[in-house]
Amino acid sequence: MRAVIAEDSVLLRLGLVRVLETMGFEVTDVVGDAEALLTAVETSRPDVVVVDVRMPPGYSDEGVRAALVIRRQWPDVAVLLLSQYVEERYAVDLLTANTSGIGYLLKERVTDVEEFVDSLRRVAAGGTALDPEVVSQLLLRRHNDPLERLTPRERDVLALMAEGRSNAAIAAALKVSDSAVAKHVNNIFAKLDLPPDEADHRRVLAVLRFLGPH
């Protein structure tokens, strides 16, 4: 699996390269700013890019804006954003722009190599990986919307869905059966007014309801 790393911190950049190469990734390019990232993606067409949210020259949202360009111009390239702090609007912007191959993690997650690589592989495979801290903050700002209909357990399930977890992974995390998770997921669809529709992916729509502005 081919990867590009865009990170201005030399130490973190070296650490990411070592982790990815140890885990079987081919790191095709390592860059320190958003402009170089776009050039690298156009040239090498990787499977996934790992991007710092804040990059030179302004250290504001250069990484996010580059990620949005990548998703528009090269939709087959998955994007995993890394951030020092929870900046939930960036996760919302990316997930509402495209519902597959997107991740947003805090940099502290990189220290747990297994968890980080699992998230990166999930994103590269077309899934999502959303930091639990981002999920928690999004939960705190929900008021007077259909999400209020959910039970605490259903909210737990939806939060794990937003992290990109499968039913089996949710069952393992909550220590319940797969059938119990399936029942909770169906209840979530019903309470969020998401009837079966072949043209829609209800799991994605439920997560977007959870993430979207209210």
Image (spheres, grey):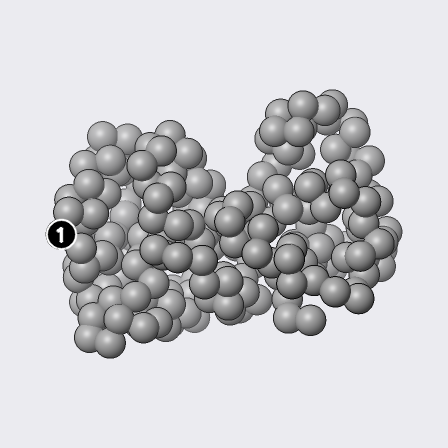
Q: Mark 1 points at which residue?
A: 10
Q: Can residue 7 be seen in this view?
A: yes
- In-image side of 2 versus 190 (left or right): left
As helix, strand or loop, the secondary structure at mark 1 comes to helix
- The amino acid pointed to by label 1 is Val
Q: Which residue is drawn at 19% across and 49% down?
A: 13
Q: Give the x, y percent position of residue 132.
A: 53, 45
Quarter of the picture containing the N terminus is top left
Depicted 149 relative to depicted 56: above or below: above
Q: Give the x, y percent position of residue 84.
A: 34, 55
Packing grade of label 1 (10 A; few <14, some 14-19, many >=20) is few
Q: Can residue 201 be seen in this view?
A: no
Query: Closest to the observer: 180 or 203?
Result: 180
Q: Which residue is drawn at 74% across and 23% down?
A: 177
**How many numbered circles does the render carry?**
1
Considering every residue shown, the one lying at the far bottom of the view is: 58
- In-image side of 136 versus 62 (left or right): right
Query: Closest to the observer: 193 or 201?
Result: 193
Q: Give the x, y percent position of residue 89.
A: 50, 68
Quarter of the picture containing the C terminus is bottom right
Q: Residue at x 80, y 66 (%)?
A: 144
Q: Which residue is drawn at 62% across and 42% down?
A: 160
Depicted 107 relative to depicted 40: above or below: above
Residue 35, by quadrant, is bottom left
